[in-house]
Image (spheres, coloured by chain):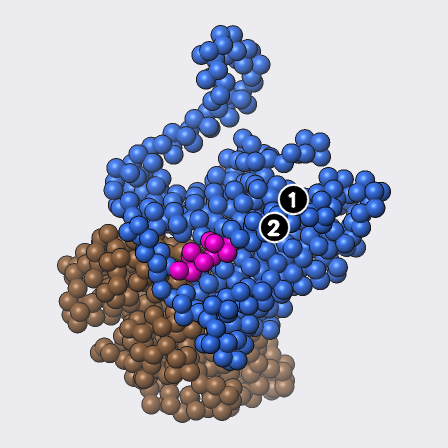
């Protein structure tokens, strides 16, 4: 009985672990993970999953719009086949990521998937896709664990064009220590993989540089009353509060912070999740003086202004933050790899090997993207962007424009 | 507990209890003692840790009362509908959301019309009225479309239908208003704080608490003193008998939904005044809290809904600071809901009829 169980377990593990024993030969292509055959004149289907509902909708919509522009910039076609982007809603939750990824994995024509927007969705979604042999190129999922060298096998097919949070944590620590010269910092996360891992990385780096984390607090994303947490933090007298939580929480935090005695002069540093006009509405007048660490969109490659122009013409509004640029880079990365490995036969059918595509994605080197030159490392990190500290200086929502409000104050 | 207390004075009772009880009773007693010990140790530790000053605790209490009175307003809607239809109206939280948005648009309109600037004190009642009207209308519409066909159906169908209505409201609002967080306007005079006996309390909290109490008093007056209230109580007691003595049951049900919806609308506006941010998805969580408050106080009982709301609000506001702090947990506020819902589970185990119970619970069960 016991051995039987063991066999069953190891069989299950084998089936779950790697999308291994499924080598397949279709037309001229043999591939260990399977081959996608695209008939003559049929579109190459690229999946996309991002936040299309919930509080982070604007980010998700912008990301896939960026991808659409990238497909257009690529000529709308690859190897003579039109490209179709099949978008799904991953919300910003594990459940959403799971649903969207399951849907995409069920479509055998999906060659590669772009997204998701959030680490929680990637944690649930990426392994589902990879089990179906589909590589995914994340647009907004930044949690370090997703590309850690010891990550589970399910994440072997996961790449991202957005920088790993370890990078943003190190940058924030540099700002806090070298520019502000603070010694005592409080942190708040909301239990999501992105905020928690970024906060942990920040704490580790900050402590290593001789600083003290006086309070390490957590809230839940649905909390509306943060006064007790803030009171608790105030008792520890931090010089700054570092909290990469999302829009609504930041709104409550900034509005309630000044009601707690002892925190009126404490600066708050947020994360890139609130790099949008929405946070101005959420926090109202209290947004003035709020700082965030976010990609330095003004240091993006020189192609970025042209992209912003094309984006604005297409959708009638300017892109928010850098999300759409990551969407663009993810699509460019995917299309370049497809172009490299796709093989056509005499009848005009296109064959793409999944394993070959994954290898081509991982081998990306110095690909000119919007956020910089994209080079993927062995763990799937391809992000090129650098960070900056931005400060909001007006509570007028229509004034949102990276460069003026918020203004880059470091470096 | 009371059994042990009595055993000291009346010898024999304890022996009798021992003879009658089964192992289940012992386990339940053990749970009671365990929970009591957990709370007491936490309380002692929390007070000894001294993280918060007395002023902090008073401010938490004030806040707990504010949010508690909003929960109470929501709970009333659940409890009134349950009392009459024996059904949980799960769309109630989303009715609150609609009321909140109606208030937002009313405030925007008043601002554009210049009323907000000219008569700032008049603006609040107008915005509240908009929230009430929208809540009542949506609630009546839900009753007519979704619940009336099930009036004489004894099954889970109305409950499932209620959950469906909740999604319809949420996603209709999402389509109409978008998903971003909307900022709620203050009314100038509401931006500040009041100082009272050395405490500083934000004015919106005071306004929300007082407004909630006034509305609750009004509702109780309606139920206790008017013909409609009498009819409502009659229908709650026995729908068929009420119809036999000439009460228009349908009209009473509509009135109940209208009043419940109006309460939810008020709750939505007051919530937004305190927290300054609303989204189309906020109805769900607040609905669950209101529902928990209704159960806590004893569903079907108006006073119970009030008490349940206040108790839940206070438990959330004070629980982490008073009890969890004593265990030196990192980040105790993440566990805020554990206290509120843990309390709910305890109530359901030891006092299923709720804190105040429903007078007729036994007969109807």
Q: Quadrant of residue B41?
A: top left
Q: Main secondary structure of the magenta part?
A: helix
* Vertical arrangement, residue B27 with respect to residue A149, above or below: above
Tags 2 and 1 both on a single chain: yes
**Disc 2 is attached to a residue of which chain?**
B
- Asked if the magenta segment contains residue B217, the reply would be no
Per the rendering, the colour in which chain A appears is: brown
Residue B173 lies, in percent from the top left, at: 60, 68
Q: Which residue is mark 1?
A: B224
Residue B350 lies, in percent from the top left, at: 54, 30
* Vertical arrangement, residue B333 with respect to residue A297, above or below: above
- The residues colored magenta run B203-212
Which badge, 2 or 1, comes first in the chain's sequence? Answer: 2
Q: Which mark is residue B219?
A: 2
Foreground residue, A193 or A11?
A193
The blue chain is: B
Residue A134 lies, in percent from the top left, at: 51, 68
């Amino acid at each position: 009985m016991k051995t039987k169980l063991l066999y069953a377990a190891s069989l299950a593990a084998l089936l779950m672990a790697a999308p291994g024993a499924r080598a397949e030969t279709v037309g001229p292509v043999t591939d260990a993970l399977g081959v996608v055959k695209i008939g003559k004149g049929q579109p190459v289907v690229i999946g996309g999953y991002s936040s299309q509902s919930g509080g982070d909708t604007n980010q998700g919509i912008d990301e896939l719009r960026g991808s659409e522009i990238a497909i257009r910039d690529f000529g709308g076609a690859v190897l003579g086949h039109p490209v179709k982007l099949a978008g799904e809603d991953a919300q910003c939750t594990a459940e959403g990521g799971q649903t969207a990824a399951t849907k995409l994995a069920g479509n055998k024509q999906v060659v590669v998937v772009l997204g998701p927007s959030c680490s929680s969705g990637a944690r649930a979604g990426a392994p589902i896709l990879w089990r179906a042999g589909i590589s995914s190129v994340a647009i907004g999922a930044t949690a370090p664990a997703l590309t850690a060298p010891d990550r589970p096998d399910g994440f072997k097919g996961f790449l991202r064009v957005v920088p790993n949070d370890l990078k943003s944590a190190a940058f924030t620590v540099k700002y806090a220590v070298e520019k502000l010269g603070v010694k005592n910092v409080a942190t708040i996360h909301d239990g999501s993989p992105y905020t928690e891992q970024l906060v942990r990385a920040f704490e580790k780096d900050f402590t290593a540089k001789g600083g003290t984390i006086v309070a390490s607090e957590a809230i839940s994303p649905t909390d509306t009353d943060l006064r007790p947490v803030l009171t608790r933090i105030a008792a520890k007298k931090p010089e700054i509060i570092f909290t990469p939580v999302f829009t609504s929480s930041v709104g409550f935090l900034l509005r309630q912070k000044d009601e707690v005695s002892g925190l009126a002069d404490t600066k708050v540093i947020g994360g890139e999740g609130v790099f949008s006009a929405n946070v101005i509405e959420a926090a109202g007048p209290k947004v003035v003086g709020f700082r965030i660490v976010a990609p330095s969109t003004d240091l993006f490659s020189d192609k970025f202004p042209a992209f912003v122009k094309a984006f604005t013409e297409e959708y009638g509004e300017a892109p928010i933050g850098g999300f759409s640029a990551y969407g663009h880079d993810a699509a460019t990365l995917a299309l370049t790899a497809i172009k490299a490995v796709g093989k056509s036969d005499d009848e005009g059918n296109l064959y793409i090997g999944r394993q070959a595509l994954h290898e081509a994605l991982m081998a990306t080197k110095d690909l000119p993207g919007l956020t910089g030159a994209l080079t993927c490392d062995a763990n799937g990190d391809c992000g090129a962007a650098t960070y900056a500290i931005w400060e909001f200086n007006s509570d007028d929502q229509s004034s949102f424009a990276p460069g003026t409000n918020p203004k880059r104050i470091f470096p | 507990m009371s059994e042990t207390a009595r055993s000291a004075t009346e010898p024999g009772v304890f022996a009798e209890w021992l003879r009658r009880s089964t192992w289940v009773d012992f386990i339940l007693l053990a749970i009671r003692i365990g929970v009591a010990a957990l709370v007491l140790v936490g309380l002692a530790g929390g007070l000894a840790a001294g993280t918060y000053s007395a002023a902090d605790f008073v401010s938490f209490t004030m806040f707990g009362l504010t949010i508690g009175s909003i929960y109470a307003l929501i709970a009333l809607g659940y409890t009134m509908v349950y009392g009459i239809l024996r059904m949980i109206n799960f769309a109630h939280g989303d009715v609150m959301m609609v009321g909140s948005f109606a208030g937002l648009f009313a405030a925007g309109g008043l601002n554009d019309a210049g009323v907000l600037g000219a008569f700032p004190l008049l603006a609040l009642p107008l915005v509240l009225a908009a929230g009430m009207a929208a809540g009542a209308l949506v609630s009546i519409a839900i009753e007519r479309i979704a619940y009336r066909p099930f009036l004489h159906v004894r099954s889970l169908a109305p409950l499932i239908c209620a959950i469906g209505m909740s999604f319809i409201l949420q996603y209709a609002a999402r389509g109409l208003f978008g998903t971003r967080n909307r900022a709620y306007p203050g009314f100038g005079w509401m931006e500040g704080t009041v100082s009272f006996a050395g405490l500083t309390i934000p004015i919106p909290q005071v306004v929300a608490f007082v407004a909630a109490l006034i509305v609750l008093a009004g509702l109780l007056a309606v139920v206790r003193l008017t013909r409609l209230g009498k009819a409502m109580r009659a229908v709650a007691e026995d729908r068929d008998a009420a119809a036999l003595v000439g009460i228009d049951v349908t009209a009473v049900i509509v009135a109940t939904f209208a009043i419940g919806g109006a309460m939810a609308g008020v709750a939505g506006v007051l919530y937004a005044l305190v927290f300054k941010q609303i989204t189309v998805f906020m109805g769900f969580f607040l609905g669950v809290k209101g529902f928990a408050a209704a159960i806590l106080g004893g569903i079907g009982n108006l006073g119970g809904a009030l008490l349940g709301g206040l108790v839940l609000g206070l438990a959330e506001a004070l629980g982490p600071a008073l009890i969890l702090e004593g265990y030196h947990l990192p980040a105790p506020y993440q566990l805020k809901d554990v206290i509120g819902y843990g309390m709910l589970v305890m109530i359901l185990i030891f006092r299923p009829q709720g804190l105040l119970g429903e007078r007729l619970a036994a007969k109807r069960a």
